[in-house]
Amino acid sequence: MASILVVGGTGPTGSAVCAAARARGHEVRSLSRAVPGSSDSRVVAGVDYRACDLYHAAAPELDAHLAGVDVVIDCLNGVSHVAQAIFRIGAVQITDAAARADIKRVVVVSDVGCDQSDFAYYEAKTDQEGVYLDSPVPTTVVRFTVLYEQVWEFATRAARFRVMPTSDRARLQPIDVADIAELIIDAAADTGADEIRSYGGPEVESVRTLSRQWMAHTGRRCLLVPVPLIFAIGRYLRAGANLVPSSRRGSTTWQDWMNRTSPPHVPSMKPGCGREPGHGGHEPSAA
């Protein structure tokens, strides 16, 4: 059994990592800006939740949080400029404290292909990785593809306007956060040299296919609008830098995940419902 500190332990990935670590019998501490309430759905039984602001934390405070810890797992994430700034600030703070505490290993959660894009978020993640890899603390970087939760959230937000931005050229390889959490805990047991590992889900599908599957599952009807793959994020997707087809992990597919997360839509059989287009019904065309 190891003592593990999960930085960002209340986020989607961090919560899953805490749960996976506890399931294996590890002692787990979570460090985040605020301690969640006891009724919070993110709370994992047996985890020691602590509050810490990495922007302003002094060395003695960090030393206290890392006292007796064997492994640190950095799950910090966020898309805002402020959140991205903490990638470097947090990495510097954590590596300094980890070196003082003689931490055995740091595991850094990152994104597949982040070093192949000049999109601001990916540049920030690459910078974060560099701080850890340049430090004296043994480091394993675990990069993974988009999570199913993120695909679902994007589709749900887009559907509010009954329009779904889509593309046949943009492909995704989404993965279950529970599967990636297990791989992160595996990396916590590393004892060798620094390493970067990349993982993706079991299927590679176009954004259009994933969108159609989401609409079929939820019963939502949206106009599928093709969008050009431009700017930094478009170049990243067009190049397939977000994919690792040679490193597929997990067996949970997009359809499996949706079935587990949300009951499938059952079409109504009331009179007047279920008409085919051309018989008085109108259906948004799919571009």
Image (cartoon, helix red, strand yellow):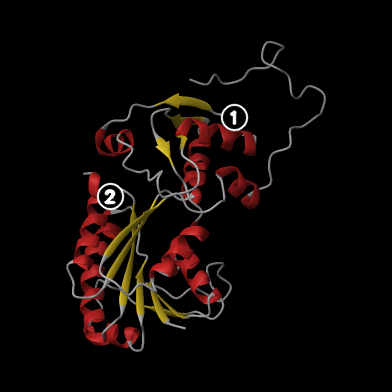
Q: Which residue is mark 1?
A: 221
Q: Nearer the viewer, residue 169 or 278?
A: 169
Element under label 1?
A: loop
Q: Residue 277's spot in the image, x, y percent?
A: 67, 15
Mark 1 Cα shell of 10 Å, populated few (<14), some (14-19), many (≥20): some
In the image, what residue occupies the spot 42% across and 65% down?
184
Q: Nearer the viewer, residue 279 or 247?
A: 247
In the image, what residue occupies the spot 57% across and 50% down?
252
Q: Residue 222's spot in the image, x, y percent?
A: 55, 29
Tally the numbered discs: 2
Q: Is residue 7 above or below residue 68?
A: above
Left or right, 6 with respect to 124, comes to right
- State yes or no: discs 2 and 1 in contact (Cβ < 8 Å): no
Q: Is residue 182 above or below residue 79?
A: below
Q: Nearer the viewer, residue 162 or 121?
A: 121
In the image, what residue occupies the spot 50% across and 65% down?
16
The circle on residue 114 is 2
Q: Nearer the viewer, mark 2 or mark 1?
A: 2
Left or right, 18 with respect to 92, comes to right
Q: Is residue 101 above or below residue 8?
A: below
Query: Which residue type does callout 1 highlight?
Result: Arg
Question: Residue at the top extreme?
Answer: 278
In the image, what residue occupies the spot 32% across and 33% down?
238
Question: Residue at the right extreme?
Answer: 271
Element under label 2?
A: helix
